[in-house]
Image (cartoon, coloured by chain):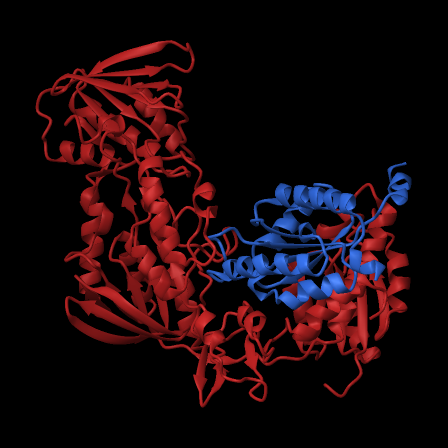
Amino acid sequence: MQEAKLETEFDPTILAFCCNWCSYAGADLAGTSRFEYPTNVKVIRVMCSGRLDPTFVLSAFRWGADGVLITGCHPGDCHYVQGNYMMERRFGFLKEALGHLGIEPERLRLEWVSAGEGEKFAALVRDATQKIKLLGPNPLKKV
Amino acid sequence: MEEEEPRIGVFICHCGVNIGGVVNVPEVVKYARTLPNVTYAEDNIYTCSEAGLTSIKNAVKEHKLNRVIVASCTPRTHEPLFRSACREAGLNHYLFEMANIREQCSWVHAHQHERATEKAKGLVRMSTARAAWLEPQDEPELEIKDTALVIGGGISGMTSALSIANQGFKVYLVEKEPELGGNLRRLHKLYPTMQDTSEILDPAIKAVNANDKIETLTSTTVSDVTGYVGNFKVTLAKGTEKRDVDVGTIIVACGAVNYTPPKGLHQYGVFPHVVTQLEMDELLRNGKIEKPPERVVMIQCVGARKGEIRAVDLAGFPKSDTARLLSKILKAKKEEGWPYCSKICCMNAIKNAILVKDKFPETDVIILYGDVRVYKEYEDFYSRARECQVKFIKHIEEVTPEITQESEGKLTVTAYDALSGQEISLPCDWVVLSTPMIPHKEEVILARMLKIPISSDGFLMEAHVKLRPVDTQMDGIFLAGVASGPKDVPESIVSAKAAAARAGTLMANKKMRTEALTSVVDEEECFGCGLCEEICTYGAHYLENGKSHTIAALCRGCGACAAECPRRAIAMQHFTDDQVLAQIKAGLTEEL
């Protein structure tokens, strides 16, 4: 029933970048704990959120992502000491750039998820999927 | 290899019913066969079983596979196993890739079979796209110097130093105070055996002094550390005197300090008979309490299990570094308290309660607690306190007990009994505050020099809280004792010996291979702006003749330089732009 109902509404495609040490492990914990969440999010593993080149995010939107989640270790917990701060800095101007490109900045989110926060990861995916459903498809797809 | 067309083998695991019960595995196999560069695909009941691994090895030979993908569980647990199967089949293990269709698919979409199958296909497609760009890597081999440095001459540092020396390696043991001993110097008796601290401390100090493999340097601090695993260059400072030593491994046993409540908290520093447990220990040791007190009241969790550390560090913290983080936490925590349970305070309070009872059997001893946390054999210790009439009263912690003073040594504690909900008024002679172990300031400087992250509690962070508890994120640097968080003496000794064993393993092998996850600069493209040198936490980049170079042994593989480089001249091996972009594209479109 639920699956049939979902097909009628907008079904977004979302990519999540997770760092190997905290948030990817948090996503794994959501699995080990069997916390269910929507299937719309696919995870790409990088060693550190600091690895995220802004072009990765822009390319994702160019290729039709309806939303992009960036997750990393909590401030102070970065495995590489300060990679997450570097990402946070880029995040500010990425959001601004998206606005100029006509893509709602809310489609991009940066959240801190520790290896122990499986529930937080699951909740984040649920919330992001819901919010992006309300936003509708990535406007670039119409171009 | 670069000239060769990718020939990818895909192995999709049912994991019994863990994946197969949700995802239609045969359908994913069928789909995988349609993907570009996929030469071979099969499903396995358990790919990680002996049969599954043999199947991978055979397929590599039979189908001349030059890439292997396993779609199963998380690479965080099983990648090493599959990588070694690839190696055994003669395939460089950097040509292996995993798709996580269990933790991140079947287990989280248990009631959405069709959609989970579609997602699994997507994850396999993304992995094949990435795999096509994978390149074989050589893992560099490093020489390991057979000398160790131990920072901190407390019980942990001394234990580590002795253990390494007994393995036959030379050790420099550095202590900032004029004498060895650390925190135990201030303690009188140890729980649960009630033996004198000196019974443990004195033999350790003697053994250290008698060991000719250990060079003890007191009143000495570490002023600089450069280099990498196996080849650290350490500058030691004694006053203005400096000295350089070369070591292969480093053990950090810098200890912790006791939290001193701010003046006025529970009237500490205002009424002379309000003291900390450590001060009570000293008073008892020195026989400063002559008149038998009528009553002693102890208050637990003073400055512990309070406050919310996340709220402090999240506020406006974009570009900061470790030092700023910790000094900010320390400042806030002074007033607010620390969020964690310091683990030792319950037993410490019980110990002092028993000591008071031993000396003054008529004295009434009351422990006001929120929770009493005694574990393993310490339960007996708690029972012993109850047997000698120590009273435990659970009070409502949210209401700070009020302390008033009639005259010196005539105090009244007013608190709320959690069970009756009634206000209780306890006239007493002494109020003793149980305060947590907290990180000390020198730790920040060390953390920065050694490039070790600090956890949100402010202690030095281990590489993995469960699997690598004495390793740090930096190869060749290990943690012993309370530097990584509160521990009692036996636990400190366990961690000190563990750290020594880890360091000894490295030095005994004389050589080690490091992961090939390092950055590589394309000199043609580099225009020498120096941004990578500026941002690298590890000092792995340097400019020479207007071009950047990577010191592979220093690079930890975070990839921040590759992301920041304005010319895209830096490749982060195994996570190159091409590899990540291919994965992104495959996650969003059907075209590869």
Taking the spot 89% from the left edge, 39% from the top edge, the residue there is A5
The chain drawn blue is chain what? A
**From the image, which quarter does the N terminus of chain B lie in?**
bottom right
Choose between B290 and B16: the one closer to the eye.
Answer: B290
Quarter of image, res B263:
top left
Choose between B120 and B307: the one closer to the eye.
Answer: B307
On screen, B329 above or below B126?
A: above
Q: Where is residue B394 in the image (x, y as percent from the top left)?
A: 38, 19
Q: Position of residue B370 (x, y in %)?
A: 40, 24
- Classify residue B380 as left or right of residue B554: left
Quarter of image, res B58:
bottom right
- Classify residue B165 as left or right of residue A54: left
Q: Where is residue B421 in the image (x, y as percent from the top left)?
A: 41, 11
On screen, A35 above or below B105?
A: above
The chain drawn red is chain what? B
Choose between B324 and B501: the one closer to the eye.
Answer: B324
On screen, A15 above or below B424?
A: below
